[in-house]
Amino acid sequence: MPGKTILASTIAKPFVEQLKSSIESNHLTPKLVGFLANTDAAAEKYAEWTAKTCAETGVTFELRQVDKTVLEDEIIVANQDPKVHGILVYYPVFGDRQDQYLQNVVSPKKDVEGLCHLYCYNMYHNIRFLDDQLTQKCIIPCTPLAIIKVLEHVGVYNRVLAYGNRLHGRTITVINRSEVVGRPLAALLANDGAKVYSVDIHNVLEFHRGEGIKLKKHEVCETSLAMEDVVSRSDVVITGVPTPSYKLPTKLLKDGVIAINFSTFKNFEEDIKERASIYVPSVGKVTVAMLQRNLLRLYDYLQQGQQT
Amino acid sequence: MPGKTILASTIAKPFVEQLKSSIESNHLTPKLVGFLANTDAAAEKYAEWTAKTCAETGVTFELRQVDKTVLEDEIIVANQDPKVHGILVYYPVFGDRQDQYLQNVVSPKKDVEGLCHLYCYNMYHNIRFLDDQLTQKCIIPCTPLAIIKVLEHVGVYNRVLAYGNRLHGRTITVINRSEVVGRPLAALLANDGAKVYSVDIHNVLEFHRGEGIKLKKHEVCETSLAMEDVVSRSDVVITGVPTPSYKLPTKLLKDGVIAINFSTFKNFEEDIKERASIYVPSVGKVTVAMLQRNLLRLYDYLQQGQQT
């Protein structure tokens, strides 16, 4: 009686269909530009997936292969081009810091990845709308957003609770604290009410909104806990360790755990389904769907801006 | 007949005196807040130096030692406090990416380090003023700015040429391409008209404004040159390699070269002055003076903002 595997394609499907139908029925003409300035195999694969999903939904996708020395100028050209509604850069280009600089060169009006400072800051501070009238939702980084959609799909979000608090009572471990996925994800889940253990090679931090989720946004506390301690008490364990050799021992997990892996490598052991109730081996296809969902949102905001 | 050593303290002195005199005679009350959230020895030393120089010039300096889990909230408190005119964070706190996020949490109105995206973007794009009336100069990151002041002091900037082009004709090598010092420095020098070779462990890039400095801002070109090739043809060689074992061989340098080291380790060999006309072994004290120069500039902008 093993647990159930749920594939990213299954989770992505309704989103892709909804995107397609929305584009068709409203005669939308969103255009996404992707910049590829490296020869990273994972980036090229991500570009292929983007093209494929865009073809399915009806988004015009243009892949621009540019030299990295002119990438910044090319982003600025796309920022200023009214025919372009979304901009995506396939990282890594230079490496950490200069890439993070580039993330802020992309205009927030076209930042489908949600990586510019405005969106990151709002996300960490649990600010969900761009405007005071609460009409324009903030853009959430694609992979953390995809994982939230996975958690909604597998029933971790409790719809009986109020929007914004639907993870209250859940304990979730995230093994990865990168600035692109792990840390924003831990913050998002804690902002939605979960108690989150954020694990990296140095330590375990706890992200939470306090007893009775009384805080408006999460706080971060240092703990003296080890990964083994927190994994065993977690309802959901989410892994993103970027090394092929890393395997989280199944025996550490709570029986009936929900196991989600967003690393390109399999971070759970072969026998994971003997312990897990639900296993999601990857999230990439949901990420690409979220990219387009962000694009349609920005397309809508751009249209609204032109009308006023 | 060895070359001349010029100490950072000598270069910093007129700046420190000018800051002091300006604060005294105009009855200015600038307050700088420094956040120390680590136990890094270099950061602690930098904090000590800041305190010492502030005491000399008359800047009120408050060092706030905070836990890194609350640093972001504390920065936001200081952003909103009208009694605080400048904010400085002693990095590293978390490591690259999260630290870069924090750099953007500091308000541009109080960013004495010049590390937020607005100032970095303007610097790379050779945008020198914040306003269309050209009254408010942009803030330049402290260490690159300090090195420019060193270059002015030692006569590399040619005052006969127009402001903005005073390095035309100079060839400068910068060995370090970090996002905090090496890359911005290469861009600044190229924007001022120099041909700059930017060296890191991967390659050598050339930053320049083109033949006859015809471009408005620098462009970056890949080269197939090696460090040895570019060092030998450089009028100025600036090193910032953060390892004690690294020594740039003196024999590679052009006779009469100007040698400047901004690493905390000595990157030039003991015999450097047998080849160099001028040797500047460190720049830290100039950096601290520039920090306060930036503070006074922001103080002035804040006062202007209150008057309008």
Image: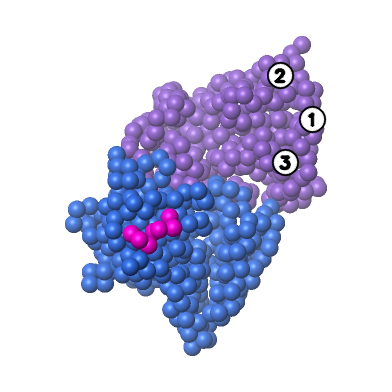
Chain colours: A blue, B purple
Q: Nearer the viewer, mark 2 or mark 3?
A: 3
Q: Are marks 2 and 3 in contact (CB under 8 Å)?
A: no
Amino acid on which disc 2 is placed? Ile
Q: Which residue is painted at 47% across and 81% down in the image?
A: A17
Element assignment for label 1: helix
The boundaries of the magenta stretch are A269-275
- Please tell me the numbered disc located at residue B6: none
Q: Quadrant of the N terminus of chain B?
A: top right
Work out whether mark 2 precedes mark 3 in sequence or the reverse, and give the earlier one. Answer: 3
Q: Which residue is mark 3?
A: B204
Residue B165: image quadrant is top right
Element assignment for label 2: helix
Residue A305 vs residue A204, the one in the foreground? A204
* Image mark 2: chain: B
Q: Which residue is painted at 60% across and 20% down in the image?
A: B7
Q: Which residue is painted at 61% across and 53% down in the image?
A: A93
Dot 2 crowding, Cα within 10 Å, few <14, some 14–19, many 20+: many
Q: Which residue is mark 2?
A: B272
